[in-house]
Image (spheres, rainbow, N blue to C red):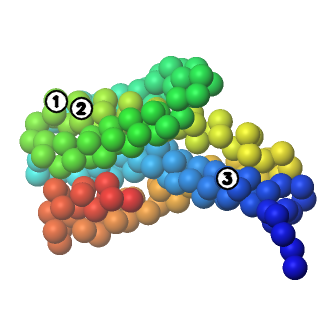
Amino acid sequence: MVTGSWRVHGKSDSVLLSNATAYTFSPKLFFNTWGNLNTFGIFQTYYESGVLFTASSSDISWIGSIASFCLLAVGCLSGPLYDRGYLRALLITGSFLTVFGYMMTSLCTTLWQVILAQGFCIGIGGGLLFVPSVAILPTYFRKKIGLAVGLAAAGSSMGGVIFPIVFFRLIDRIGKSADIYIVCSY
């Protein structure tokens, strides 16, 4: 009979659970940060159709540009916060802002409202989530770190494929608000 904690390669089961957790959630964070930004093209196509508001393509493209800028700029702030041990606060705040931004986007009727909700709110939320998704992997993986980061980064491409398909297939069937709620639920 074996007593004590189960060990594999000198690591206890609690450490293995942490590795599995980091490996599971990092691709999901990539999925919901860069995957969201990769999806903006389908949103721009919908906004350009004039169903929601009338604006030029140039004006509409500001939404995605602001979201991308916020994601990268907030990353400069969330990095030091992560280093000081505020991982949980970053994840909670970033998740809230991303979900809140999508919920507000579903209610928007003018360009400036969409810029605030989808550009700033989702962009800042993504910025708070992105740096921890990159920085957490090296703390849990010593060997095959390239594989771990590569698989995590694949979450971005999966988000860029899945989100537009879901949005495009459901927009005519259930309407903009319900469609955005479903996209937000991922």
- Label 2 to label 3, Cα distance in Å? 37 Å
| Pointer 1 residue | 112
Front label number (2 vs 3): 3
The residue indicated by pointer 2 is 115
Disc 1 is placed on an element classified as helix
Residue 47 in the image: state x and y as whole percent.
21, 46
Q: Nearer the viewer, mark 3 or mark 1?
A: 3
The residue carrying mark 3 is: 18
Instruction: Indicate the amino acid at tag 2.
Output: Ile
Residue 175, picture quadrant = bottom left
Q: Of residues 140 and 119, which is closer to you in this image?
A: 140
The three-letter amino acid code for the residue at tag 1 is: Trp
Taking depth in this image into account, of 164 and 76 the one nearest to the observer is 76
Separation of residues labelled 2 and 1 (CA atoms): 5 Å
Residue drawn at x 83%, y 55% is 11
Q: Is residue 177 above or below residue 58?
A: below
Report the residue at 64% width, 51% height from top.
22
Mark seen at residue 5: none
Q: Is residue 24 visible?
A: yes
Q: Nearer the viewer, residue 11 or 132?
A: 11
69 up-or-down from 104: above or below: above
- Asked if marks 2 and 1 touch (Cβ < 8 Å), the reply is yes
**Which quadrant would the C terminus be assigned to in this image?**
bottom left
Q: Are marks 3 and 1 in contact (CB under 8 Å)?
A: no
Q: Residues within 10 Å of mark 1 (few under 14, many from 20)?
A: some
Q: Cα distance, mark 3 to mark 1?
A: 42 Å
The residue shown at (24%, 56%) is: 180
> x and y percent of residue 127 in the render?
46, 32
